[in-house]
Amino acid sequence: MRLISKTFQPLITIPKGAKIKNTDITCKSQKLLLENGLLRPTSSGFFTLLPLARRVLNKLEHIIHQQMDFVGAQRISLPNLTSSKLWETSGRLNAIGPELIKVEDRHGKKYLLAPTHEEAISELLADVGPVSHKQLPLLVYQISNKYRDEHRPKHGLLRSREFSMLDAYSLHQDHDTAAITYDRFTDAYRHIFDKLDLPVYRVEAPTGDMGGTISHEWQLTAAAGEDAIKLCSSCSHTELADGNSQCSQCGKETKQINSIEVGHTFILGTKYSESLKANFVESHGTQVPLTMACYGIGITRLLAASLEALSSETAMRWPRAIAPYSAIVIGPKEGSKEWAHHDFEKVLEVSIRISEAGLEDDVVVDDRHALTIGKRMMMADRMGYPYIIVCGRSTLESPSRYELYQTHLQQSKPQLLTLSELITAITDSRGEEKISVRG
Amino acid sequence: MRLISKTFQPLITIPKGAKIKNTDITCKSQKLLLENGLLRPTSSGFFTLLPLARRVLNKLEHIIHQQMDFVGAQRISLPNLTSSKLWETSGRLNAIGPELIKVEDRHGKKYLLAPTHEEAISELLADVGPVSHKQLPLLVYQISNKYRDEHRPKHGLLRSREFSMLDAYSLHQDHDTAAITYDRFTDAYRHIFDKLDLPVYRVEAPTGDMGGTISHEWQLTAAAGEDAIKLCSSCSHTELADGNSQCSQCGKETKQINSIEVGHTFILGTKYSESLKANFVESHGTQVPLTMACYGIGITRLLAASLEALSSETAMRWPRAIAPYSAIVIGPKEGSKEWAHHDFEKVLEVSIRISEAGLEDDVVVDDRHALTIGKRMMMADRMGYPYIIVCGRSTLESPSRYELYQTHLQQSKPQLLTLSELITAITDSRGEEKISVRG
């Protein structure tokens, strides 16, 4: 059983307007992650993810791996250090410029810490190729740390210099077949955001430095977002805000909402494969440049963006599927009347039963029994654990009853349940969740 | 069901003494990984892991995560880019020198791509500290890419410049309590190598640049190894080879065997915590530098080292727990007599039954039916899949019988089994494996 007393979670209190080492506190997610001991800055734009944040990241990665597997993308690992020459060839060394972090090895050879891998994928395909048209479409992806030397890193994980990202690439014979796979990735993205139960909208976007013919940003609505989208309640069209409040499709008035970009997808055409000579062989034997599409999700950014979308100023709220733990069990204060009746052994028993009811190792016990129940309740609420189970006064009843707080439901009062009712309540509400995700 | 036709596995044949782009082929693992389409070099000392190698890495990581969890180490993620200042403070910036890959950001601030994180961990503890003696021991770990600018990178993944590594750190009140945790990590390491069924020996080693009081290398015996150890058959003592063939413990003659370092563990004492001010508060309130121990396993190196230890010059052999797939199913050649009787649908049925017998998604079907069974058998043998199941001539019998080759058993003839016998054989031999791992 996991114990809070054994969890490395350095809590701090940040006074209003305070400047914490290396970083201004400019947004809610940053403040909450720091105060609750999930994150520490190491220098401007760089962060250490502490155990509870790392658990969230594991869960996010798991959801993404599942969906990549579902679309048939194969996981690979490209080196983070990429030869600068490739970026010269594609023209992006100058186009992106100072945001690229450049590195020279001991022999003076030039590399950069890749922010994305279109060049590397094209070179890989050129190296092993030309592939046959029969091998297409070819879908690959990786999850790795990416680098961008932001001029002024800010907002914690929303705009950091080293960040975790999904980058997927698909390779095709032509634009039409690329479009089919692009739609399948769109579905995978929808599944990911549905699983997180987050309001993420796909909107058409300019292709920018990346180039290509089609591009969509995936925008999560959140008050603190630096972007904005227009939602049309009349025809359901969604688009990037552009100063004009009318819907570009039906002309009706739209509602503008701030948002955070959590993903970006492109049909790139042959921009990279032409310059880097990534070809395939057609059925009649001629070599033709591959058509490429690419798909990104900023994973550490999504973690922070979820908090921006769901949390209050003082309490974190997570998509239920990625909360650091699904449930926390809080036992009585040591020495209290309840403690005499319901000691640590009994608290553990409750925790184990909940684990066995499908939460497995996703249950943690707040075993800091020297603290009052109220104090630990407050901390659990701030952490946003979806189920808070308190062994309080009602454990004195026969049979013992437990308080269940479901932080997502915003009930004013807890449910008072026997152990078996508690198990049923948790199992049932998780069951509903599973069905709604699949729906 | 996974299909070989959909697997990105670019096969090549490397003539003897050939120089492949960016790399000399100097060892078996490098040649086998390249030829069989698991790996591609991108530039000297940098490699792309293709899907089948990535699967092996996933399995290795899973085994390591399990054991880290078992010892109570909490997963974190430190940035790969670490401030150079920390390394100046610890004195290692000069001590390690040219092997450190240095980076300057757009403002001229100096970083390096960390090869290891003692400085970063010490700074983290200083930042959140001083921690209380009650929080000790504190155990954390990460799995991430590390960097070392080898003067002459060689032997493929055995000595690359970007590599995947486990690095774990434990923090203590004093040397005695550190020694207790050090022993527990030693057990965890033994479980990891037992699970892989690899002959890995723990030997005392000099502490070198790392400093500290105690250090052990974890050496895997393999003919191609650049290191060597002495095994004493008389008293079972094992030590690094040192030019003297006698056992340092009992004086008897030892046997010297080449080996590859796959892990290294240290009790570091207070070297880093003193210079970086990582303290804890004793029960009577005084601040004292933390005692640190650290634990590394080169994960991509271990992948290659396993191949060095187990493979022949032409055929890969893996620890059974990390083969890219546990089983491959080979159907008849299209148009053959067997094909008429046992078509793709039936091949799939066999594969699904095997999956359901506990192998789950760890079964692949070689659906390249235009190729002969013999050709596909040869490729499967080269890949070293532990179970090769062939739907050959005996599928014409009633009931159909299947050929089972267990590549680890070096049987000259396959077992001829009905489907239910096949399932039993696989289930039984996996059962034994599980028991032996636990023993």
Image (cartoon, coloured by chain):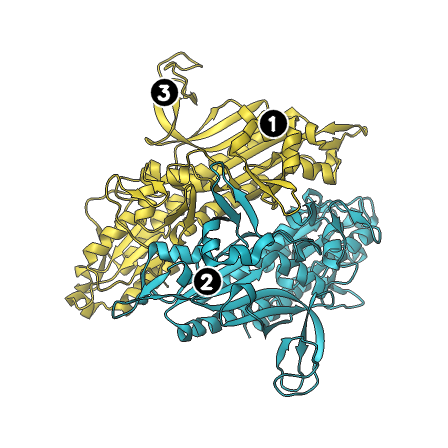
Chain colours: A cyan, B yellow
Question: Marks 3 and 1, Cα distance to the nearest angstrom?
Answer: 31 Å
10 Å crowding of disc 2: few (<14), some (14-19), many (20+): many
Is residue B111 something one can see in this rendering? yes
- Write down the chain letter for disc 1: B
10 Å crowding of disc 1: few (<14), some (14-19), many (20+): many
Assign a secondary structure to mark 3.
loop
Question: Marks 3 and 2, Cα distance to the nearest angstrom?
Answer: 54 Å
- Write down the chain letter for disc 3: B
Which residue has dot 2 on it? A169
Q: Position of residue A85 (x, y in %)?
A: 45, 50
10 Å crowding of disc 3: few (<14), some (14-19), many (20+): few
Which of the two residues, A117 or B171, is positioned nearer the viewer here?
Answer: A117
Q: Position of residue A221 (x, y in %)?
A: 68, 70
Q: Quadrant of the C terminus of chain A?
A: bottom right
Identify which residue is drawn at 38% across, 58% down. Answer: A125
- Foreground label between 3 and 1: 1
Callout 3–callout 1 Cβ contact below 8 Å: no
Is residue B436 something one can see in this rendering? no
Question: Marks 1 and 2, Cα distance to the nearest angstrom?
Answer: 44 Å
* Left or right: A112 as drawn, with respect to A374: left
Q: Residue furthest left?
A: B337
Give the image quarter of residue A285. Answer: bottom left
Q: Position of residue B64 (x, y in %)?
A: 50, 43
What's the amino acid at mark 2?
Answer: Tyr
What's the amino acid at mark 3?
Answer: Ser
Give the image quarter of residue A413. Answer: bottom right
Which residue has dot 1 on it? B268
Which residue has dot 3 on it? B233
* Left or right: A17 as drawn, with respect to B21: right
Which of the two residues, B342 or A360, is positioned nearer the viewer here?
Answer: B342
